[in-house]
Amino acid sequence: MPLKRTILIAVCLGLVGLLAVVVWKAGFVKHPQAPPVAGGDSRTSRQRTAPAGNPVLSALGRLREKPERTASLQTLKEQQAILQSMPRDQALAYIRAFRASGQDHPTGLDFDIGTGGTFSGWPTLRTFLLDAL
């Protein structure tokens, strides 16, 4: 009797999990979106462009030139300083706008954790931005 009950519970849980995946994939559950960027419009976050003067786009442009590793690291360190020096809401808006665009670019750096548990190497620009958050 206990084996039948265990099998019945396992089948029910499997069906509930399958139903959850079907509902998620079918779009009945809204996927979270980035909040509107200041000065933005009512378009969805994927259609929204980054705020003017976005330092993240500057970094992307430099990384697309395929610089050597030391130049990539210098670019990211500069962008890190710029993002840290601006008001938090503004930096978050820049990062969210870039994230919502779906863009990314390799940096040529290895993923590396430095002293104190902070990142000191980011393989992609999106990895760098997640760390910057």
Image (cartoon, grey):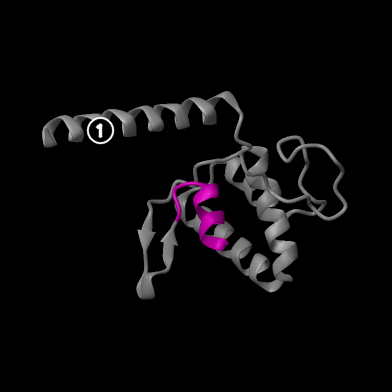
Q: Could you tell me residue 131's position as x and y percent?
A: 51, 60
Occupied quadrant, residue 78: bottom right
Q: On the image, numbered disc 1 is attached to which residue?
A: 10
Residue 63 lies in the magenta stretch = no
Three-letter amino acid code at the position of disc 1: Ala
Q: Is residue 12 above or below residue 36?
A: above
Q: Could you tell me residue 60's position as x and y percent?
A: 63, 46
How many badges with numbers are in the image? 1
Residue 56 appears in the picture as rendered: no
Q: Is residue 130 left or right of residue 39?
A: left
Pick the quarter of the image with the C terminus.
bottom right
Occupied quadrant, residue 122: bottom left
Q: Is residue 86 above or below residue 34?
A: below
Dot 1: element: helix
Direction front: furthest residue: 1
> In this picture, which residue range is highlighted in magenta?
122-133
Q: Residue at x 50, y 42 (%)?
A: 106
Sort mark 1 into few (<14), some (14-19) or many (20+) by Cα contacts within 10 Å.
few
Q: Residue at x 71, y 55 (%)?
A: 94
